Image (spheres, grey):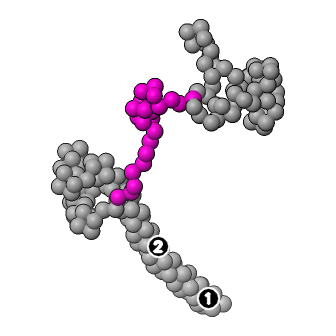
Amino acid sequence: GSNLSVLLQSQRGPGGGASQPLDAFFLSGSSPSFLGPRSMVSFEDVHQVNGSTRPFFRSFDHEENMEDEFDEYVYQPEKKRRLSVDQVQFLEKSFELENKLEPERKIQLAKDLGLQPRQVAIWFQNRRARWKTKQLEKDFDVLQSSYNSLKADYDGLLKENEKLKAEVDILTD
């Protein structure tokens, strides 16, 4: 059985409640929405299932044929796979042709490259995000140079205007 369930069962006092070492897990009377003197959950038996109570923590017995069922719920992430240079070049060329990815095209690219369709879709999504960022940077640079040019022209016109005003003032006097 589980060491945790054994520990919890041995820590219960004669009244069936959690003993003092477990009190650190609870905030006394912090919320009226919880019944009882403790908020959060109690490690006491939980819910009535078919008229019987079941413990909050249940020991896991490998002989109960739950191994297959348990494995379904345990997520074991795979190691991140790096794409080869050839795969990236192929994807880049495909992106240049069309940066949107239709389902049939995604499946075909995945087959051609020996990847999962999801990997291809995520690569395209990330590549579109990088493309958009670079496009925004280019647009900003174009606008910045246009602004700088207009500002220089404006400043030049202001100086010329002041110069002409000064000439008008001299001629009117």
Q: Which residue sits at x=42%, y=36%?
A: 71
Q: How many marks?
A: 2
Q: Is residue 97 left or right of residue 121?
A: left
Q: CA distance from mark 2 to mark 1?
A: 33 Å
- The mark nearer the N terminus, 2 or 1, is 2
**Circle 1 — which element?**
helix
- Image quadrant of residue 146? bottom left
Q: Which mark is residue 144?
A: 2
- Image quadrant of residue 103? top left
Q: Which mark is residue 166?
A: 1
Q: Is residue 103 left or right of residue 123?
A: left
Q: Is residue 115 left or right of residue 157?
A: left
Decide if residue 34 is in sight here. Answer: yes
Q: Amino acid at mark 1?
A: Ala
Q: Which residues are magenta?
A: 59-81
| Above/below status of 126 relative to 140 | above
Decide if residue 161 is in sight here. Answer: no
